[in-house]
Image (tube, rainbow, N blue to C red):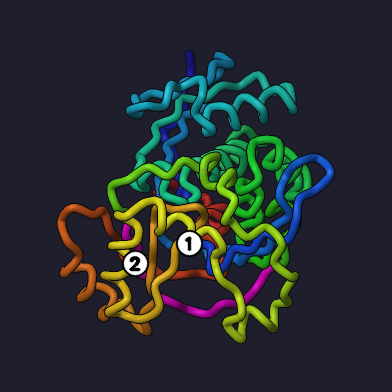
Amino acid sequence: MVMTETAYWPAPAKLNLFLHITGRREDGYHALQTVFQLLDFGDRIGFEVTDDGEIIRVNKIEGVPADEDLVVRAARLLQSHTQCVQGVRITLDKRLPMGGGLGGGSSDAATALVALNALWQLQLDEQELLELALRLGADVPVFVYGRSAWAEGIGEQLQAIELGERHYLVITPACHIHTSKIFSLPELTRNCPPITIAGFFRDVGVNVFESVVARHYPPVLEALAWLSDYGKPRMTGTGASVFASFKDGAEAQQALAKVPGKWRAFVAKGVDVSPLVERVRSPAPF
């Protein structure tokens, strides 16, 4: 078996700066409006191309069997779609908390599609990759798209949006949010009137899941309350991660130093162009 040198690619996190449910579609999915803010922090994935056609995740991830891992599923989907005869050994450096609303698994899948399209020299265009991404999950396309974006539909209708440079303190309390449970709760708002991008910039949007999750998951409420000392706290996705924005990284780092040890936390910069896109433009391994 011939193998190439391992090339590492970024799988950045995302934040939802607001999240509305505007209705339910005929196919049963909820219609959404949101803004995806991409971050300069996330997982890292190593790809070692082989000539044996096998797709293998080298390291173990607690609670995620390799066959169920989105990064493996993405690689297999791309291989099947293109009839590629090459394989890959995947090393996943998992730095984002699982189930925290930061898009880690979706981002990993998108990075697999984009990276292997390059490493296997498949030359699929962005639209083809986006179509494959949607088959893996509603949050996967934005990471292939690679720009912070206004999103509608189930999250796949994307329009690039300029958010400028922001710094965020992100906290993940120690609780697991059962997304299906949250969607089933009667108090969840499902009929938000659609807003515009201009409305978002006037701070019209909220995360409709935030108050519901905070009511049912006290650790999330506690983290939101702690962050309120530093500005307006918000929750991303269906949780459990919460965040606040800062005018510069130094202020965010000062707040990070005070985060109680019972919570996972990090500081990241919001970016309009994904580190994954930058990696494609500069293909040397890092």
Is residue 284 visible to the viewer in this orientation of the structure?
A: no
Q: Is residue 168 above or below residue 136?
A: below
Q: Which stretch appears magenta?
A: 160-172
Is disc 1 in contact with disc 2, using a CB cutoff of under 8 Å?
yes
On the rendered structure, is 256 left or right of 8?
Answer: left
Disc ID at residue 224:
2
On the rendered structure, is 68 left or right of 131?
Answer: left
- Number of numbered discs on residues: 2
Disc ID at residue 155:
none
What's under tag 1, amino acid-wise?
A: Glu
Residue 65 placement: quadrant: top left
Q: Position of residue 127 (x, y in %)?
A: 78, 48
Q: Which residue is mark 1?
A: 210
Q: Position of residue 53 (x, y in %)?
A: 58, 16
User: Quick check: is 163 in the magenta stretch?
Assistant: yes
Is residue 3 visible to the viewer in this orientation of the structure?
A: yes
Q: Report the Cα–Cα distance between label 1 and label 2.
A: 10 Å
Give me the residue at 63% from left, 50% from top: 144
